[in-house]
Structures are given as C-alpha cells and as structure tokens.
C-alpha cells in the first residue's frame, strides 16, 4: 500500500532505521536513476559495495577508492580493483585486489606486468597452489631462484625445493629446508642433505639426517670420526626398535653394542651400561 505513496514510504523507512530497509530503498531509488538519494541510503545501510558501485558508475572512482580503503570491505575493494584493471591502472588494481584478498588476481597482474617485487609477497599471502605457480614462474624466468626455492618449500614441495636449491647452490635455503626433513622424507634426499652438511662441517645436523634416513651405522661412525658427544637423546634415536624391518635382531644388538662402546670411550658409563643391557651383553655390563 505504501508503494503507492513514496513520501509516506520514505518516512516509514526513516522511522524504522533498519539497514535492510535502507538498502532496499536505495536499490529502488537507484532503479529510478536518483543516484544521489540512493547513495544516501546506501550510506545509512553501510552497504559499501553499492556505494562503490554507484560511485564508479558516476565516474568518481577516486571516492570509490577512498570508501574501499577506509572500510576495508573486500567486495568493495574487488569492485574497485576490476575498475582499475579495466583502465589499465595496474598498480592500483593490484593494491585493491590485495585488499580484497583476491591474491590470485593480483598475482596474475604482477606476472603479466613483470612486477616481480610485489609478486613474492602476494604469493606468500596466498594458497599453496599460487605459491607453486609463482615458484614455477620464477624458475622459468631464471631469475630470483632463491624466491623459487622458498615458495616451493612453503607450498609443501620439499623435494622440488631441495633439488632446485642444490642445482642453484642456494646453501642458506638448504639449511632452512633441512629443518623440515624427518624420517618420512625421501631417504635419497636425506642422504644427499647429510653429505652437504658433512662437506660444510655441520656434523650434528648430518647425524640427525642420517638417523632420519635410517643409516644408523653411518651416523654412529660420523659421531666417532668427528668426536661428537653421544647424548642420551642421540643414543635413543640411534636405538632401533625390536620389531624394526631395517635391521635383523643380530644387527640391532650389534649396533647397540657399538653405541655402548662409544659411550664408554666418552666416559658416559651410565648410558653405556643401559645400551649393553639392551643388547643383552651381560659380561660387559657386569664388568662395568
């Protein structure tokens, strides 16, 4: 009934102070080409997307940008970004796509326009797929290979990150990536990384990787060759479980005795006794 009397309807809407009604009335006024009145009600409704949309339609993208920046509204920011992209204002478009958290769009524009400095930060903010895609972009360009390595790593492609780090001699990156390696990692990669750390005299890290690769004898031998202290934690990591498929029971006991012998040489008799006991060597245990 009130639709037949616009004045009464507007009075009613103003009296109710309801954001949904403000927004509805704004849409109605916009459909009647009363843009300034529509903007007033969109403002009351805090409908930032509609405010931005109308401002852009009226050619006032500067005011639309201010609204998007001040409110941080993602939908409004996305609309402004698309407007700037249509006008080839790439820097502004990237900014507002970023504000809208539409990182894939921002990344796309950066790659198309060689904005490599901004690209890295955007990729790190985005999802693993975008990180992977950006890493491939850097790798194919043959520039910023350190960034490619970091992004492959952040995206969860540890093997690829290591391969590229080795190929491009990104030794600092290798050290960071190695922190994420564990017994579930590719044994070949673990061994390759341990060789790298041995070459660079980082023997403790090399031992950890050899243990993760289940190369227990090599790890223990490295401890002996480099006079590394066998701590209780290291001794436990070198101790193979009884039901392990990596060593026979005889081989397991032999390794335990070697660990115990090493502890003996270092004067850690308590730990040596523990390992002799686990190996079932009562003679050496009793001798101590």
Image: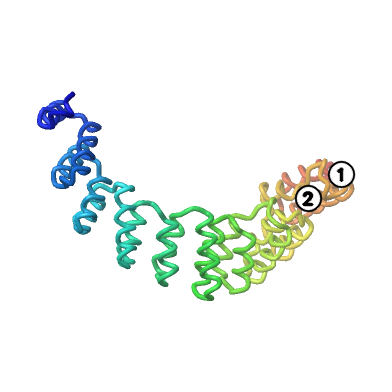
The residue carrying pointer 1 sits among few (fewer than 14), some (14 to 19) or many (20 or more) residues within 10 Å by Cα, namely: some
Q: CA distance from mark 1 to mark 2?
A: 10 Å
The quarter of the rendered structure image containing the C terminus is top right
Residue 174: where, in percent of width, then height? Answer: 58, 65
Q: Nearer the viewer, residue 213 or 49?
A: 49
Q: Nearer the viewer, residue 206 or 43?
A: 43
Q: State the image quarter where residue 61 is shown.
A: bottom left
Label 2 element class:
helix
Residue 163: where, in percent of width, then height? Answer: 64, 67
Residue 106: where, in percent of width, then height? Answer: 40, 60
Mark closest to the chain's N terminus, 1 or 2: 2
Q: Which mark is residue 260?
A: 2
Q: Residue at x 43, y 69 (%)?
A: 112
With respect to residue 82, does 34 lie above or below? above
Q: Residue furthest top?
A: 1
Q: Residue at x 15, y 45 (%)?
A: 34
Provide the residue designation for mark 1.
Answer: 281
């Amino acid at each position: 009934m009130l639709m037949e009397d616009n004045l009464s309807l507007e009075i009613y809407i103003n009296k109710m102070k309801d954001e949904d009604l403000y927004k509805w009335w704004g849409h109605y006024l916009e459909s009647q080409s009363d843009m300034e009145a529509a903007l007033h009600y969109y403002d009351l409704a805090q409908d930032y997307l509609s405010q931005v949309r109308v401002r852009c339609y009226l050619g006032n993208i500067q005011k639309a940008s201010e609204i998007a920046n001040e409110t941080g509204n993602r939908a409004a920011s996305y609309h402004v970004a698309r407007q700037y992209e249509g006008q080839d204002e790439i820097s502004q478009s990237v900014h507002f796509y970023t504000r809208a958290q539409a990182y894939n769009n921002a990344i796309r524009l950066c790659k198309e326009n060689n904005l490599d400095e901004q690209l890295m930060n955007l990729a790190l903010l985005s999802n693993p797929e975008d990180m992977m895609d950006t890493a491939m972009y850097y790798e194919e360009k043959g520039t910023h290979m350190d960034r490619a390595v970091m992004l492959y790593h952040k995206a969860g492609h540890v093997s690829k990150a290591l391969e590229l780090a080795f190929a491009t001699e990104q030794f600092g990156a290798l050290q960071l990536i190695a922190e994420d390696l564990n017994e579930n990692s590719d044994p070949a990669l673990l061994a390759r990384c341990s060789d790298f750390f041995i070459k660079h005299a980082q023997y403790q890290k090399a031992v950890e990787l050899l243990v993760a690769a289940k190369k227990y004898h090599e790890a223990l031998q490295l401890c002996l060759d480099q006079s590394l202290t066998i701590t209780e934690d290291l001794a436990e990591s070198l101790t193979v479980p009884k039901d392990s498929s990596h060593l026979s029971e005889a081989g397991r006991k032999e390794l335990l005795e070697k660990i115990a012998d090493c502890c003996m040489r270092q004067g850690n008799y308590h730990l040596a006794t523990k390992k002799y006991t686990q190996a079932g060597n009562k003679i050496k245990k009793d001798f101590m």
